[in-house]
Image (spheres, rainbow, N blue to C red):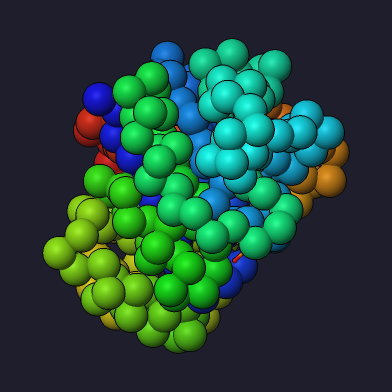
Amino acid sequence: MGAVIAVLSGKGGTGKTTTAAALACALSELGRRVVCVDADAELRNLDLCLGLGDQALMDYGDVLAGRCSLEKALVGPADFPALKLLPAPQEPAEESLEAVVMPLREQFDYCLIDCPGGLRAALAAAFPADRALVVANADACSHRDGERIAQLLRGGPECFLLMNRVSPRLLRSEKMTLDDSMDRVGLRLIGYVPEDNRVPLALAAGTPLLAADKRTWRGAAAAFRRIARRLDGQRVPIR
Ligand SMILES: Nc1ncnc2c1ncn2[C@@H]1O[C@H](COP(=O)(O)OP(=O)(O)OP(=O)(O)O)[C@@H](O)[C@H]1O
Ligand SMILES: [Mg+2]
């Protein structure tokens, strides 16, 4: 049975989709069978972050309505043969994701769920998960929203904080540290990802970040690779 990991946040736009796509690629580089589920019905874009914008033809709405099989809806980027995406419908979805997540759990080592913005929708999408990554940025609004979602997840999946778009210079100027972020959100840190303009550049080129950045050991791609190894049980120092 594979592990189900929800990627969510209180506040929108913190980098959930970027994180789900990059961690899925990084886990597949480690030789794991990975599927990511885009749970952001209507506003999907995980397909774009994986360079699959023109291939996501069927979605989990089609699967739940019996219009196609689960296997037929799965698509995968050429650079990552062990990675599949289950796209979200482009219209509102009423059905629970659990019915598709359960069979995926049997076939894959990791199932990552890219949750939508908004507290209620995010919590509903994260419901089948074993672990939850709360993605936050280093600002007061994001801390407060992260703290709120962490409280609401209590008693559910095991939760970690993932700090994204971290700028060491900004932290220094505000006399803040990542420990302050951890204290404010109230979760254990799984890792931090720096602000890196290669993230929007890869998106604009229609290439997964980790395919665009195969060699460097700095920047966002490297940070996601380190977090993936931690998720996979390896001991990798945070800093
Ligand atoms: N580490 C980073 N460095 C630079 N830009 C980033 C980084 N992470 C994300 N971004 C940019 O931030 C924007 C929002 O990212 P993303 O779409 O992943 O957020 P989201 O939390 O999924 O948003 P939503 O709540 O709308 O689903 C995108 O333009 C993305 O390219
Ligand atoms: Mg998103």
**Image label count:** 0
Identified at 79% across, 38% down, the residue is 53
Q: Position of residue 117 (x, y in %)?
A: 55, 68
Please indicate, yes or no, whether residue 213 appears anywhere in the rendered image.
Answer: no
12 with respect to 103 (left or right): right
Q: Position of residue 204 (x, y in %)?
A: 84, 46
Q: Which residue lies furthest to the front in this view?
A: 66
Who is closer to the viewer here, 169 or 96? 96
Please indicate, yes or no, whether residue 233 appears anywhere in the rendered image.
Answer: yes
Instruction: In the rendered view, tell whether residue 153 sits above or below residue 11.
Output: above
42 with respect to 166 (left or right): right
Who is closer to the viewer here, 200 or 76? 76
68 with respect to 102 (left or right): right
Identified at 39% across, 22% down, the residue is 108
Identified at 29% across, 34% down, the residue is 3
Q: Which residue lies furthest to the left in this view?
A: 155
Q: Position of residue 29 (x, y in %)?
A: 49, 20
Q: In which quarter of the image is residue 80?
A: top right
Instruction: In the rendered view, tell whether residue 16 sits above or below residue 78.
Output: below
Give the quarter of the figure containing the N terminus.
top left
Q: Position of residue 115 (x, y in %)?
A: 50, 57
Instruction: In the rendered view, tell whether residue 167 sits above or below residue 10.
Output: above
Identified at 45% across, 65% down, the residue is 122
